[in-house]
Every structure is written in C-alpha cells, then in structure tokens.
Amino acid sequence: MQTLATHAERERGADSKNVFWIAELTSPEGLRRFCSRPLALGAAIFEPRIIGLKSFTKEMDGEGFCGRSSLYLEIFNGGEDSIQEIAERHSVENMRVRLSVLFMDERGDAASEDIIWLGDFKVCAAEFLPSMARLTLLDPLAYFGGRPILRMEGGAALPLIFGLIEQAPLRLISPMPKGLLDMRLDGELAPEDAALRLNNASGLPLFGALQVGDEVMMYGEIDEEARTVGSPQSPLLRPHAGYHSNGAPVRFIPEGGLAFLAADHVCRRIANIRANGFPVENATISIEKYCGRDVSVARLPQWKCIVRHAAGSSQIIFDGARTSGAWIPQIEDEAGTGRAVDDYSIATSALLNEKSPRLSLRFAENLSGYEKRLGVLTRAFFETHYLASRTSGGHTVFKAGVKKNGISQNAFLLFPEDYFSDGAVGNDSALPILVHRLDITEMALGGGDWDFFCGGANAPIFEIEFAGANGFARIADVSLILEYRPRVSETILDAMTADVEGLCAEGNLARNPAEAVRLLLTSPDFMGLPADAIDKVSFQKIHAKLDADGIIYDARINRQQTILNAIAEILKAGDFRIAHEADGVRFLPALRHPAALGETREHDFEITSALILNDEPPLCIPTRGSASLGEVCVRLPLAAVHLERGDRIRLMHEASRLNEAFGEIARWSLAEPDCIELGIRLICAGAAVWRFDDETLLWRQAFQPVLIFYIRGRAVARLEADGNFAFLGEAREGALEEQSLEQSIVFDAKRGLLYFGAGEDGNRRALFALDAGGNLLTRGEVWEYQHPPAIKPADYIQSLTFEGEDVLNFSLDLKASLMTAYRTSGALRLTGEIIENKS
C-alpha cells in the first residue's frame, strides 16, 4: 500500500467512474471492508456500501487550539449485520477506520498495491438513520505528519503560501489551558510588592514568568489555594517594577518566550509583525521542527501591551502642607540665622537675610514609578509665592531656576517692586504676595517624563537665590504641580499577524495560480504526481463543481485539457485563492473590498439597520488570532434572506462606527424560532464621513486610518495617515475654474466632478476637485511637506475660519491636520506629498 505523498508511478487523472473510495472498519468483531462501487481485488472482499464521503471541519474550542479535522462517512446500513448492530454491541470509541482511494486505469485493471492510503481515523460519533449510518471520523494529528499543524477559527486552515499574504494570522504553538489566558489581578500590585494574588492560580507551573500589563516578572513559588504567586520568603523578581490596578490582565509566558506559527512550511520572509494592528518589536524569526517538519516560527519575549488613557487630565500637587515628606528643605547657612520650619512644610515663611541668600529644594522621593500609578505626564511647573517689602533705595531681586546634572536651566529674574511701581504700596511696607510659575514641562518630557524626577545625585534641584534684597524677603510657599492623563486600563494584545512571503519551486514565488497548482500536484508533501504526467492531455470532458465557503462555481470544459490547465482555468474563472487543509486542497473565493485605488465596491448582500432586530448597532467582538478585524454578530428574521457561509456582506448602521463594513459570513445559528444569528468576520470596516450616494462618498477606514475618495463606485484617491495624498491621475495646478458652492463638498453628477470648498454660506468657493479619472484639479498651488496648522480638528473634514481666513481642513484622528485648503489663495497644503498615477 502506498501514500499520496510517495506515489509517483502513474497519472492519477482518472474518470470519476474509475475512482474507488475504500473504508476499512476495524472493531472488536474483526475487519470489514467497504467501497463506493463494486470492486474485486484478489481474495479481499469489499462491500459496495459507501454512499458518500463529506469533509467536515470541527469548530475551534475555547482555548483556541485545534489540530483536528473530521469526515462524515456515510455507509448503507441495510443487511443482516448492520453497522448499527456492531455499534450497539461495542462502543464506537472501539472502532477505527482506514480511509483509502483507488484509481483504475482505462482498462479497469488494478491491484491491492495500487491502493493509496489517505489516513487512519477513529470513530468519535455515529448517527443511524433508517437506511444509512453516518460515522464522524476524527483525524488524530499524530497520524498526519504532512498536514497543517494548527487550524484557524471557523475551520479555515493556515494556508500554504505561494506568494505574499498580508496580515496572515500567527498561531501560538504551545497550547495553554484556558485559565492561563484568563488570569487577572485580585487586588492592586504596587512596585514594592513581593507577591500578587490572582483570580485563579490553578494550572500554573511551579515556577516561571508572568506578565502584568507591560511588566514581566519571574516567580518561584505559588499557592493555588490562596491564589498567590510569590511570597516574602520567595519574592517576585521584578527588574522593572511598576504599579498595576485591580483586575489588570495577567498572562503566563512559556520558557523561551512566545512561539507563533506563521506557516506550516519554510517561508521566504516574515515581516511587519503586529498585535491587534499595533507594531511589535523584538521579534525573532526562525525555522524550527514541529511534528517532523520544518515550519516558520516567530518568537516574542512577551505579549504586547497597550495602555489606554482617559481624555481629560488630572493634577497632583507636591506641597509640604499637603504631601508629607515630599520635600526636604536644605538651607545653606554659611554665617546667618536661616531656619527651617516644621516637617509638614516645604519652606513656608523661611526667613532669609543677606547672610543666607540661597534656598535649595531637593527631591526626597523617586517619582519614576508614577508612570505606572498615574499615567502619562503632560505638564510640570513650580509655583512660588513671594513676600517682599518695598524699600526705598533698592530692589528685591529673586533669581530662580532648576539645576539638573549640575547645569542651571530655565532660570529667571523677578523684581517684585516693579509690579507695584504705581505707588499703591508705600515704602517700607510689605508687598502683596506675588505668585510666579516656572514651567519645566519641556525639560521633564525631554528628560524621560517621570524618570526626570529620579532621586539620587542626578535629581533636579529647584534653587532660589536672592540676588539683591533690601529689608526682608520671604518665600511663602513652593509647590511642584504635575498634570497627567490618568491611566484607565491595560490591554494585552494577542491577535498576532504578519506579512508572510511563501516559497514555490526552487525557492521562487509562484507567479500565477497555474504554478501554485503545479506545486500542489507534484510536491511529494502533497499529491506527489510525476511532473511529466500532469502535462499530458488526459481528459476528454471535465465537469467541475467547486464549492468553497458557500460560493459554488460550476463549469463544464468540453475539450481536451491537461489536469494542470483545467484546474488553473477553473481557479482563474472563479477568482479563487488556494489553501491546503488536513483533508485536501482548499480553494477560497477572493474577497473584494475597497482598499486599493481603482477597485470598485462589490458586495453580494446588504444588511441595513432595518433588517437588524431591535434596530441596535451590530455587536463587534474581537477575533483573537484571526487575520480579520473582528467578528460582528447580527440577528435577522429567518425568512429575510437566504445566506451561505462565505457570502460577502456589507453592513450599515448609522449609530455605529461600523456604519460601513465588509466581511464574510463565518457562522450562523438559530437564535429563536423565527430569528437567525450571523457571525460576520470583518475584512474592512469604517464610516462614510460624507456621502452623495452608495457609489460616491468619502469613506474612512476604522482600524487603519485612511480616507478613501469614491466617485461612481471607484476609489480614485486616498489620504493616508502620513499626510500623503495619492490619486489615480495627475495633479493640475490652476486648472479649476472659479466655482461657487452651496456646501463644503458638492458632487456634480453631470460632469463627474467632486468639489471641495470653504467659506461662509453664500460666499463659498471651490478650492480643488477630483474627477472620475482620479485627476486632481486645484485653483492654486500645491505645497508639500508643510508644518500642520495649529487647528484642533472637530471633524474629519471641517470648514472653519483659521487666523482670519476660511479653510477646509482634513484630519484622520481628530488630533492633527493632514491637508488644508485656503480660500483666498486657493493653495492646498499637505503634511506629506502628492503621489500621482497611483494604482
């Protein structure tokens, strides 16, 4: 008996009538052989009782790891000794099936050694109908060293990659119990803590590494009953200790880091590794052996973490009257009577005379851990309250500044008397309290944010010196005021993707589907057919029915063809892509979505809010480990539409950020007697920021900020996050005629021009336009690489008055301007560049 991987004797392009499926069922009662049509091979007895053999993919389990595939084997259940009777006498768990296939030659000759073994299965379930036994066969991964190692959600296999696949999913190789992916802190974790408490510590190894937020720590002791990790006797090893709030996610890190499978074969290149769309650093790529084969692996030292902050800001004041011990006043008293007051004050009413002219305030607390506790530092300044007397014949001069690493910075001179030179305060009398703020934000942010305030010899010193003083001079109060954006949550990012470039014959990339199919047919790891055989004309007529993810392609070829050309023609006509699964080669339909210039908006079915029960926005569920953006769940009336898995879907809902989304149906279930719930795997999502109709609109992607300009269903231009403005045609400066507009964006359907303008109602002028060919027409000059204007965007496209001039401003994140058009000059200013003839 031989296998497909090693068979290289004869051409396998046979007529369907010459293909025999064979199932050898082993039970405690002995061996039974079944086949799909009458067959005689020597003394072996084959019962022609196989009715059908269907591929079935088991859904992923909750842990995200599934290396199993299964088949439905349908066998005629009649006769005196039926399959059901055998199953009733013995459990189905004691039954095994060896599945094989036999190709007869044109004369109908074959021998037992020509049987091609496909694999050994065990029966995991059985369903008995009146005349049929349906056996569910489980494919143990150990029996299939040449099959994909891991499977994606919904049953899709990691593809055998022949070209470049962007955002291909990366799969964690070492399975973990679900509990290790669902751990959280029970209580806060401070930088000085030697142990932590979890919601569940069961399943953790006795020693290893944990990640809390973006901090990795080592442990050598656990108490499952108390749910604690570490102890005073065996403290946590925390090289970069930080503060973590109650409920923060905790992840276990296996020894050697996190290993992700990029493809179950050797790849040419793996790049642009991302977690939930965010770039990942410190990744290493290697070729390693798993299950007896070389695979492409990406390794990370830890999970990527993102800290999300609140939009507002908070303030903390380090003042002796409010924060005990925040400062230690050190008065340099060489010959005078300088004194420090009680411990709860910074320097309140510290009397300084000419013999003790300097007051130095040095930090007593290391503030570097406050980034973990508080959030992102946004502003820092000293606030000083001065007291002085107005004395005739001289001035009181304060010289203040911050000294860091022995260098004075941000120093200033203050003359209190000058503030009251109008005579409102008489001579020899106390002046009102004068408040001065010394802003050190730029120094702090340039010095490592919170790390700027680290203690030790390099800690900053706030220094006040009386350069000249007559009478008395006092410092009433000194405070350090820090403003920050508070931390609200930490998120572990684990939806890993990468750009994977696969290999083809002789290390080259496949240039077309025909080359990919040739490799599938001839590679010893797959079909194993001889190279010269697949080029022979072996078919008179072909009837191909290709069913891939619910999309059916039915074709008849009525001329002589080679098997290679026939498959390539089917793929090209049906626009399918290729993947390899445990049960054979899989052809997937190509999904069209509006990401590249020149593409059109295509969809098979449209779901609007009117069809969604209760008129609620779709619920977006992130899909871990998938190349998609996530999954949207919607409910529809059962009789509304007829949908198939793999159908391309367009979602619209005005109350949701997904009011323009495209995806594929990944699953469905009957939620209620008259309602069906669809799980739609999103491929792209966004929102229409302006719409003329369904074919002419401005569409902003939700997860990769880019603004796409559509005219009559075609993407003609796009504004990207780096400020580049790309379009299909050319830029024509000064080619736009004078045109008044009723609104900021107007589409002229007759001329096919999309106008953009600025100004008040009744006085709005067109500044630039795009035509259906993707040409940019401007009224003035185009300026590239311009510093963005200091506009706080309130919308993605906003007409406003800035510095006395009407402008039209474009932004993708509502934080910074990327493109601005000016009404007076007609100029178009970009932070990036113009890219013409972009396809």
Image (cartoon, helix red, strand yellow):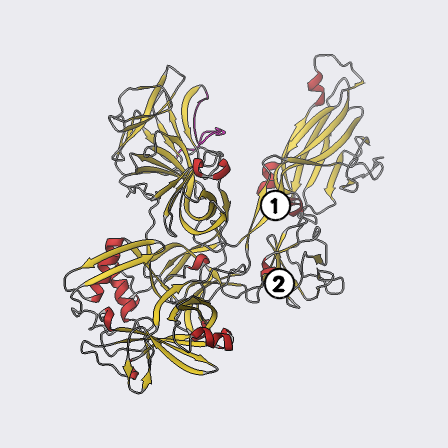
Amino acid type at image mark 2: Ala
Query: Is residue 469 something one can see in this rendering?
Result: no
Residue 489: which numbered mark, if any?
A: 1
Q: Which residues are magenta?
A: 786-803
From the viewer's side, name the closer residue of 560 and 403.
560
Horizontally, is 352 left or right of 652 in the view?
Answer: right
Extreme bottom residue here? Answer: 43
Q: Is residue 50 visible?
A: yes
Tag in front: 1 or 2: 1
Secondary structure type for disc 1: strand
Task: Please identify the dominant SS of the magenta region.
Answer: loop
Q: Earlier in the sequence, mark 1 or mark 2?
A: 2
Q: Nearer the viewer, residue 810 or 481?
A: 810
Q: Helix or strand or loop: what does disc 2 sit on?
A: strand
Instruction: Report which residue position mark 2 lands on.
Output: 209
Residue 625, x across and y down, in percent:
48, 56
Mark 2 closeness class: few <14, some 14–19, many ≥20 residues within 10 Å: many
